Image (cartoon, rainbow, N blue to C red):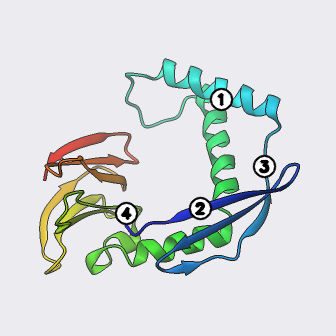
């Protein structure tokens, strides 16, 4: 994926301007209000910590009632960090990231960290992650999940690809 840089500037009190920059262009910035006061933020962070401890080794598809406030907290933070114009900008960056539009419909892309940078990996709503040769656009590997692939990343040495999916799994593949 191309780099996307978020700039968050404090305006006054609880108001912030959120702007995005990338090779696809810049957003002018959106004025937004941080959704939590200091006390509420501390309480929400404690809820996240407890939810993580309770679910450390559990794989499930349904979210228990006690974790729903944690997901709501995450949604509110996401809305703050990515107002509508920044989300549109992110979508434009993603659409330019993957060969054949694979990442255009999906959620993730990464480039091999080696100096040659000859490969990229993308993840998509088609429940696959794919490894591509940059020079030719040829698909090298297809990796399947049971739900959309939301995260892909090469290992630092470029020999493995980690993928994460909305199905709640993370997998490690040979690159």
Label 4, secondary structure: give it: loop
Q: Earlier in the sequence, mark 1 or mark 2?
A: 2
Q: Is residue 50 above or below residue 32?
A: above
**Cα distance, mark 4 to mark 2?**
25 Å
The number of numbered discs placed on residues in the rendered structure image is 4
Question: Which mark lies nearer to you, 3 or 4?
Answer: 3
- For residue 34, which numbered disc appears in the image? 3
In the displayed structure image, the side of residue 42 where residue 157 appears, left or right: left
| Rendered location of residue 106, percent (x, y) | 39, 66
In this view, the residue farthest toward the front is 115
Q: Earlier in the sequence, mark 4 or mark 1?
A: 1
The residue under label 1 is 45
Residue 120's image quarter? bottom left
| Rendered location of residue 111, percent (x, y) | 27, 62
**Cα distance, mark 3 to mark 2?**
15 Å
In the displayed structure image, the side of residue 6 where residue 161 appears, left or right: left
């Amino acid at each position: 994926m191309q780099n996307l840089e978020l700039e968050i500037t404090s305006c006054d009190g609880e108001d912030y301007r959120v702007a995005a920059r990338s090779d696809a262009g810049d957003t002018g910035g959106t004025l937004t209000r941080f959704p939590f006061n200091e006390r509420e933020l501390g309480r929400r962070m404690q809820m996240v910590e407890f939810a993580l401890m309770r679910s450390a080794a559990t794989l499930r598809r349904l979210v228990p009632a006690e974790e729903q406030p944690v997901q709501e907290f995450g949604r509110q933070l996401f809305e703050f960090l990515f107002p509508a114009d920044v989300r549109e900008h992110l979508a434009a960056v993603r659409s330019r990231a993957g060969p054949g539009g694979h990442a255009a419909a999906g959620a993730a892309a990464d480039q091999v960290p080696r100096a040659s940078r000859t490969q990229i990996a993308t993840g998509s709503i088609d429940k696959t992650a794919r490894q591509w040769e940059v020079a030719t656009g040829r698909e090298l590997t297809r990796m399947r999940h049971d739900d959309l692939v939301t995260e892909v990343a090469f290992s630092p040495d470029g020999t493995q690809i980690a993928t994460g999916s909305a199905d709640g799994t993370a997998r490690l593949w040979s690159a």
